[in-house]
Amino acid sequence: MVAIEVSGLSMTYGDLRAVDDVSFTVAEGEFFGILGPNGAGKTTILETVEGLRRPDAGTLCVLGEEPWPRNARLLPRIGVQLQTSAHFERLTAREQIRTFAALYGVDHRRADDWLERVGLAEKAATRTEKLSGGQAQRLAIACALVHDPDIVFLDEPTAALDPQARRNLWDLLRGLNESGRTVVLTTHYMDEAEALCDRVAIMDHGRVLELDTPAALVRGLDAPVRIEVLAGLVDGDDLRAVPGVDDVADSDGQVVLTTRRPAVALSWLAERDALEGLQVRGATLEDVFLHLTGREYRA
Amino acid sequence: MRAVEPQERYVGRAVVGPGRRAFLSIAAAIAKGFLRDRAAVFFSIVFPLMFLVLFGGVFTGGERAEIEMVRVGEITVLDELSSGAREAFDQTFEVREGEGREAAVAEVRSGDADVAVEMVGDTLVAHYTQTDQAAAAMTAGTLRAFVDGANVAASGEPPRYDFVPRRVEDESLQPIQFVTPGLLGWAVAMSAAFGAAATLQGWRQSKLLRRLQLSPAPTAAVVAARVAVTVGVALVQMAIFVGLGVAAFGLQLAGSWWASVPLLVVGTLSFMALGLLSGAVAKTAEGAVNIANFLVLPMAFLSGSFFPLDAAPPWLRVVSQALPLRHLNDGMLDVMVRGEPASAVLVPMAVLVGFAAVMSAAAVRLFRWEGD
């Protein structure tokens, strides 16, 4: 079943073509990521799919409904977390989520359950202004889920969070689509998309450059593997002679070799008992982005 | 044959509760947010009350303070007053003996006394300053009257003409009667405009407006919740103002004062519209409140919230007719203290509705979803 179908979507602000002929579909139960640097058009796509904007061109279908104009049949079935934490001022976490629950006709008990599920039970009586960034995001996500929607839209949920808070939030996000819920997430973090998403659309300048599973995107790169060994365990010139090794470089007490046949290089190193401190790195989405755009990823 | 109903589309879950529940929960959220905002509570209730206490309590002392007189030497004309005139004199002046002419005049100059009097031959000479013009005029007039009275008495003839002062004003011109409706009008205008401006701008910035748009809550429920809370605050302001005025400052309400309630509600809507316009134009919540302040405060002065416009130049009185607060104040004065019939609020209400319509239309035109 298709949850979201976007075809030929274009959005223009003045001279800026924010979204340029974008098409994709999201299957029911899928964890779908839209990845790209700031200004790539991720949020515009999300807001158009949610029904906040009228598309300049193209067609949208969400759960069999057109999202624009404001569609009262669709709204109870989608949950939305916006980029900034959209909260009522000076309410406690509990009052906040109960207010949102009431908008969807959901009772207080289920609202309180959600507070517990996102780990904010002991912060229930704290004003939202006093919550940390990660806590505020978890509350916003709980508010988006309180009516048990079929699709959840998360716009950069981990932006501006410290690494620890990001990891905590990932655990929460991973659980979101366990019950078959569809999740659409935008992010400018490569590792986040790789860790969470079933499929990723990589965007830049309003266009979708590539759309596939993270693994397939990396595989499609056919990038060499980088192996790092402690310097001093092996001789650089010997390494260069190993079959399949393309390059050997010294960096910071490490010898870094690049190869497309890692098995050969690894067994060669094992024979010489040179595995101490060994690190093997395959290509990442970062490399995919670099490959697609020809430039470093600007977050 | 039965008509076949078109099959209802499956929406996944029970139909979401009516707008009533959304209205109640949003209104509760706004009300809590207001009550917990100390600055908002201060500026909409405590701050105007301070003015009420100031104008009502301090200036309502009612009678003017006595005029301080310094006597230099013997003043026969004053010592020989008849008992009736003596009583009037004592009510007007507080007399003490001066230490010589120079010192007495210096006292007047420095403001420690209002007037210094001495006899030069048969002439009563009064030294006074024009710093307090009312006191100066009163001093000169009163002393002249006493001297004239003394002259008549000295002639031995009965006075040909008599003079009896009668005050036309009734209680309704006591300062508290005037300042309560005016200050209440200002307080309501201020909190309605600030509330609407800050809400629109703050909710736009935090994207709460967007978030509510993405919930099934009807837009009307969201708007109605904000209006209900603001009107509620206005009614609380009125209860406190009128209650305190009656209890502490001798405010006397006229028979049709209840007609000020619908007038106040319409006035609230009118100034909410002004706040919405400020919120639509401004880039930040602070900016929105500043614009609202910039519009409401001068308007309060020009509309007679603080001082009666009777003494204002004619052009100002004409200009003030263009200000909604002037009509709110006039209507409130008419029914609360001037004793006009309830129908006196109809024209001000119509003016305020018109003003609200124009402001709202402008706000809708200028509103942008994107704050930045």
Image: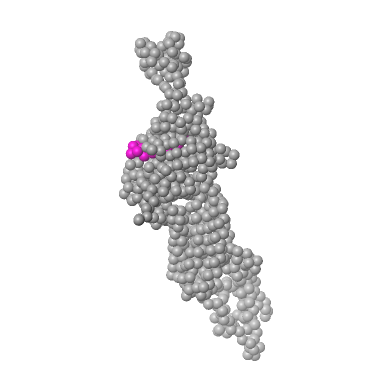
Please tell me which residue lies in front, A290 or B232: A290
Q: Position of residue B328 (x, y in %)?
A: 54, 66
Please tell me which residue lies in front, B153 or B219: B219
Q: Residue at x 47, y 41 (%)?
A: A60
Q: Position of residue B361 (x, y in %)?
A: 55, 57
The quarter of the rendered structure image containing the N terminus of chain B is bottom left
Q: Residue furthest bottom?
A: B157
Please tell me which residue lies in front, B355 or B98: B355
- Answer above or below: position of B291 versus A217: below
Q: Quadrant of residue B88?
A: bottom right
Q: Residue at x 36, y 44 (%)?
A: A148
The quarter of the rendered structure image containing the C terminus of chain B is top right
Magenta residues span A175-188
- Residue A94 appears in the picture as rendered: no
- Residue A23 appears in the picture as rendered: yes
Q: Quadrant of residue B35?
A: bottom left
- Answer above or below: position of A237 versus B321: above
Is residue A125 magenta-colored? no
Q: Residue at x 42, y 52 (%)?
A: B217
Q: How is the image coloured?
A: one colour
Please tell me which residue lies in front, A171 or A232: A171
- Answer above or below: position of B333 versus B79: above
- Answer above or below: position of A3 versus B44: above
Q: Position of residue A194 (x, y in %)?
A: 41, 30
Q: Residue at x 40, y 14 (%)?
A: A265
Q: Residue furthest front?
A: B1
Q: Position of residue B345 (x, y in %)?
A: 52, 70
